[in-house]
Amino acid sequence: MLLLALLACHDTTIKVGGGIDSPTGGTDSTDTVSGDDTATDAPPIALIAALGPASAGSPLTLDGSGSYDPDGDALTAYAWACGDGQNATGSRATLTFAAGVQTCTLLVTANGGLTGTTSATFTVSDVAAPRAKWTVLVFMNGDNDLEEWALGDMNEMEQIGSTDEVNFIVQIDRSPDYSRLDGDWTGTRRFRAEADTSTRSIGSPVLEDLGETDAGDPQTIIDFAEWGIQRFPADHYMLILWDHGWGWSIRADETSALQKGISWDESTNSDISPADGELLQIVDAVDARIGGKLDVLGMDACTMANWEIAQQLRDDVNVYLASQDYEGSDGYDYTGFSDLTANPSLDAAGLASSVALHFHEIPDSTMGAIDLSHMDAVTAGLNNVADALLQSEDPAAMFTLAAADAQGFDGSRSTDHDLADMLDKLAAMDATADGADPATAAIVAAALDARSALDDAIIVNYNQGGRVKDANGLSLYSPVQGRVDNSWFTATWAAETTWGDFLKAARGR
C-alpha cells in the first residue's frame, strides 16, 4: 500500500520530498532546485504533506506550507502540477483525484527568484473514507492562564472517547508558564480523543505535533477545522472554540478598559475579533470545506451569547451555543457528550440542548442554544423597536428605561444587557398614563412582536437564578454609561439594524 492509502489506516500525516525519507518505502519523491545556488543564497526547500486520506471522488488537500528557504527569504509563489492535468497555486491545493496512482509536483519560488521543487507519488483508493455521524472539533487555546483547564477538559473527553459514529477531534495549544501537568509538553498538538481511565494525563495518541502556533490567528483555527473535516468526515459537524471570551469585538474603544473578542493567545498577544470579521472568516472557511452550513458552533468561553454574533453568523451556522455570563474555568461538561455517543442520531438542536443542560447541571451560570434561522425575524423586530423609539420625544429617557435596570453581567459597568429583558421593560409601559410619550403605544407593540420573534429563536436557555435570573439567551450592546465603542458601528451588523441609529440618538454619539 502506498503513501496516501496508509493515511487512512494509520491516522498519520506523512511528509514527502525535500530530502525527507518516506517511512513507507512506497513513495517516489524527487527534489530539484534551480537558480544561482551560491554559498550565500541557498535555494528554497519544497515540502509536501497530505492532510487526509486519498479516496476517489473526495477532495484531498496537499499542503506545501511547510516549505521554507534556508536563508529565511520569503516564499513568493507556489505552483502545483499533477500528472492527471490538474494545476493549482497557493501553499495548499485541494484537488479531487480518480482512483489509482497519482503524482503531483510542487514548485516554490523564493524572494530573489531561486526555486525548489518536489514530487509526490501516491495511491488514491477506490474505497470511500469511513464516515461518522458527527465530528466534534474542539479548538482549545490553552496558551494563557487556562492551560490547566484545557488539559482537564481533554481528560473529560477521554472519559467518553470517540466511537465509529462520533469523532472528538482536539487541538490544544499550551502555555510555557502555567501548568506542568501531562509531562509539561509545550506547543500545539492534535488528537482524536480515545477512551481511557486516567483523569490526570492524556492517553490519546498524538496525531500531529505542530510546535508553537498562534491560537489568536483565524488561519490557525481554519487550518485545524479543515484538517479535521477532511481527515474525519461525518454527516454533521460541531466546532467548539475554547478559551477566554469577551463578546463581539477584538478591542473596545481605546478609552475603554473593557476588552472584547475570543481566543486570546498570551504568547502572541492576539485574539479573534468578531467585529473585524475574523469569526465570520473562520466560519465561512469551515462551511466551504463542509459544502454547507456548520451544524453547531459552540463557544466554550465567557459572554459570547449576543445578538451581534448571532446576526453575523445567521447564514453560516444552524445552531449557536453560548453563555451570556462568565463561565467557570472548566467550561463545558465534556463528559456530558456521552449523550451523543449513546445517540449519534441527535440533530443539531438536540446536541446543543444536551450540552447546555449538562453545563447548567455543573452548575454554571448561563447557557443558551439559538436557532439562527430565526435571526432575520429577530432583527426585523429589533429594527421596528428602534424605529419606534426614534419617534419618541426623549430617546435618551427611553434608552435609560430599557437598559439601566435590565439584566447585565458586569454590574453597573455592563455594556451588554439581556435583549428580552429590555423588550419586556418597554412592553410594560402604559400608553394610557397621563403624560405618556405619544410613541409609547407603537413602542409597546413593537417590543411585544420582537419578544415573540426572539422566543422563537431560543431553542433552550438555562440560568442559575439570582444575579442572572433575567438572562434569556441573547444580550445586546447597550452601554448606559461610558463611551460608546466605535468598533460596533464599523462591523457588518451595524448596516443591518437601526439599533445603532437609536444608540446615537440616545447617547449623543
Image (cartoon, rainbow, N blue to C red):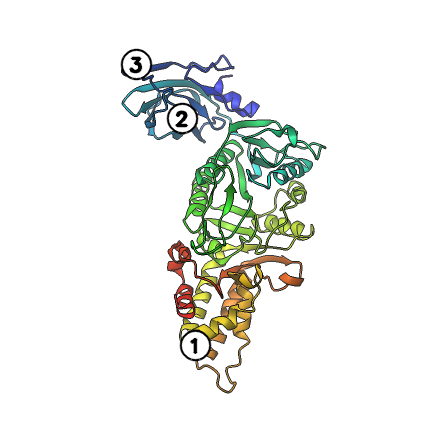
N-terminal-most mark, 1 or 2 = 2
Question: What is the C-alpha distance between the residues marked 2 and 3?
Answer: 22 Å
Point 42% across, 68% down: residue: 507
Mark 2 lies on a secondary structure that is: loop
Amino acid carrying label 2: it is Gly
Instruction: From this view, report whether residue 153 is shown above or below residue 413.
Output: above
Amino acid carrying label 3: it is Asp
Point 64% across, 32% down: residue: 180
Residue on which disc 1 sits:
394
Give the number of the disc on residue 37: 3
Quadrant housing the C terminus: bottom left
Mark 1 lies on a secondary structure that is: loop
Question: What is the C-alpha distance between the residues marked 3 and 1?
Answer: 75 Å
Q: Is residue 448 visible?
A: no
Q: Position of residue 285 (x, y in %)?
A: 43, 41
Instruction: From this view, report whether residue 483 is shown above or below residue 332.
Output: below
Q: Position of residue 88 (x, y in %)?
A: 33, 29
Question: What is the C-alpha distance between the residues marked 1 and 2?
Answer: 61 Å
Instruction: From this view, report whether residue 450 is shown above or below residue 27.
Output: below
Give the number of the disc on residue 64: 2
Q: Given this view, does label 1 or label 2 mark the residue nearer the observer?
A: 1
